[in-house]
Image: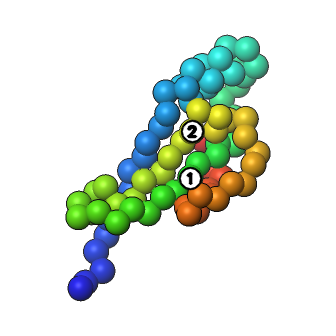
């Protein structure tokens, strides 16, 4: 079995967009500096390579500072 590159995909929950727009309106205004976003990387065993690598961005990704592991690797990055 040869090692193959699998494209990286993302799953972003809809509440994330609501929280992002609320934060932009209430706090950030015209400030476009980087901000912390919490995401979970979840490798999946599937037959389709494009479905095997997912980054999940949860609804509380802008406000959560917790490091929680559910069999996935936690990633913190800047958006």
- Residue that sits furthest to the front in the current view: 70
Disc 2 is placed on an element classified as loop
Q: Position of residue 69 (x, y in %)?
A: 64, 59
Disc 1 is placed on an element classified as strand
Depth check: give the residue in front, 13 or 5.
13
Q: Residue at x 56, y 63 (%)?
A: 71
Q: Determine whether, in the image, residue 66 is placed left or right of residue 42.
A: right
Q: Is residue 35 visible?
A: no
Q: Where is residue 72 in the image (x, y as percent from the top left)?
A: 55, 61
- Residue that sits furthest to the top in the current view: 25
Depth check: give the residue in front, 78 or 37.
37
Q: Quadrant of residue 52?
A: bottom left
The Cα atoms of the two marked residues, 2 and 1, are separated by 8 Å
Which residue is labeled 2 in the image?
Answer: 58
Q: Is residue 75 visible?
A: yes
Q: In which quarter of the image is residue 49?
A: bottom left
Q: Which residue is drawn at 56% across and 52% down?
A: 40
Which residue is labeled 1 in the image?
Answer: 40
Mark 2 and 1 residues: CB-CB less than 8 Å, in contact?
yes
Q: Determine whether, in the image, residue 75 is placed left or right of residue 45.
A: right
Does 30 appear above or below 48? above
Q: Determine whether, in the image, residue 63 is placed left or right of residue 11.
A: right
Q: Is disc 1 surrounded by few (<14), some (14 to 19) or many (20+) residues within 10 Å? A: many
Depth check: give the residue in front, 44 or 9.
44
Q: Residue at x 55, y 26 (%)?
A: 15
């Amino acid at each position: 079995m040869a090692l193959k590159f699998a494209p990286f995909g993302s799953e972003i929950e809809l509440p994330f967009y609501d929280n992002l727009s609320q934060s932009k309106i209430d706090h950030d205004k015209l400030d476009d500096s980087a901000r912390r976003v919490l995401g979970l990387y979840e490798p999946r065993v599937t037959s389709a390579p494009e479905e095997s690598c997912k980054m999940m961005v949860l609804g509380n990704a802008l406000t959560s500072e917790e490091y929680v592991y559910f069999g996935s690797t936690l990633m913190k990055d800047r958006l």
